[in-house]
Image: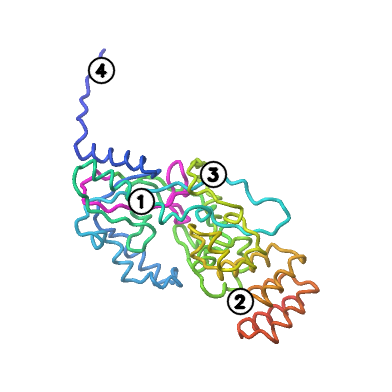
Amino acid sequence: MVAPLTLVPPPSARRRLTDRVKRLAAEAGLAVAAVTDAGPFVELEPVLLGHIAAGRVAGLDWFTPERASFSCAPRNLQPTARSILAVGVAYRVPDAGKPDDGVPRGRISRYARGADYHGLLKERMRALHARIEAEVGRPVEARFLVDTARIVDRAVAARAGLGWYGKHSCLIVPGHGSWVLLGELVLDLELEPDAPLERDCGRCVICLDKCPTGAIVGPYTVDAPRCLSFQTIEQRGAIPREIRPLLGDWVYGCDVCQEVCPYTGAAKEPADPAFAPRSLANAYPSLAWLLRMGEAEFRETYRGTPVLRAKRRGLARNAAVALGNVGMEADVPVLAEALAGHDEPLVRGHAAWALGRLGGREARPALERARRLDPDEGVRVEAEVALGEADS
């Protein structure tokens, strides 16, 4: 018996344009692209306001209730918006791991080892925008958004079906895991929205269990002040003493919750050279070198990468803590040198803490000297506390 003929209607003009825009996105170097409408994110606003009220974004002073509410309505940014194209670049490049060369080294989060994605994404989005205007034959009003609280990147991408929220609060993208950096083009084009993915993490809670500081306080909920990414990047003052031992060898960011995710393990590694580290210092820098580097050397090494955001003082502070965690007695002279002569009191104070951790014959006289002679009261206090820890 012959099966009845099923007639499939041809795709609409809007569907054809949407498919073409996605192909143009790939040609512009954007690994993934999906579409949602420009309507408000009604369910998101109470979630953001709840996080603020609970103190989960404490320290991010720019993340105010007013800004959170503003970010939930895309047409606040562009009144003519009709669609939002969520795009992303996959940044997981091959990693040989920390070399076994006897040098105490720190660890930089994968996303920050190569090009600064803010500029790279916007450059590729602008190239895509030019292609779209050529395709439709008219100027297209657009806004290019990358990592800004004026819109919530993950919420846009999730509603567009680009991926789904993992319990670590990162977006999990099929084929890439959470190794995707997101951006949006807010457009005055009427594109065909994609459906959200009906996927979740099931009963898996590995990311919650493995978070070094317990910052993932529940599924889909991160307490930012406890997160190592916050402490090593956004924290401008002293890292809380109770968090310092948990920092391990991280000097910029943290990838633990992504590394342990089963979906991350299955992610393919792209060949995008933009995210490959230029040198070993861009991935696994020597901790002694970080403590000794000058401003010009810092800027030259990390020029064009996100690491500049931490500033030299922040990166050296993190290096002192990391050396206190992974160093040995042979590393005491480096810390003693930093305690005695670093130009930043913030770094000297954390070097004192690290000396208290490592102990040894040379640690005590360096701490005694700092307790008596350092011009900064905060450093003197750190040295005094470290002396007590070195004796215990």
Label 1 sits on a secondary structure element that is helix
Could you say which is closer to the camera, residue 137 or residue 76?
A: 137
Is residue 225 placed above or below 282 in the rendered structure?
below
Label 3 sits on a secondary structure element that is helix
Residue named by callout 2: 343
Residue named by callout 1: 157
Applied colour scheme:
rainbow
Q: Are marks 4 and 2 in contact (CB under 8 Å)?
A: no
x 30%, y 52%: residue: 185
- The numbered mark at residue 3 is 4
Is residue 235 placed above or below 271 in the rendered structure?
below
Q: Is residue 242 left or right of residue 85?
A: right
Badge 3 or badge 1: first in the primary sequence: 1
x 65%, y 60%: residue: 286
* Disc nearest the viewer among 2 and 3: 2
Could you say which is closer to the camera, residue 218 or residue 48?
A: 48
* Disc nearest the viewer among 4 and 2: 2
* Disc nearest the viewer among 3 and 4: 3
Badge 3 or badge 4: first in the primary sequence: 4
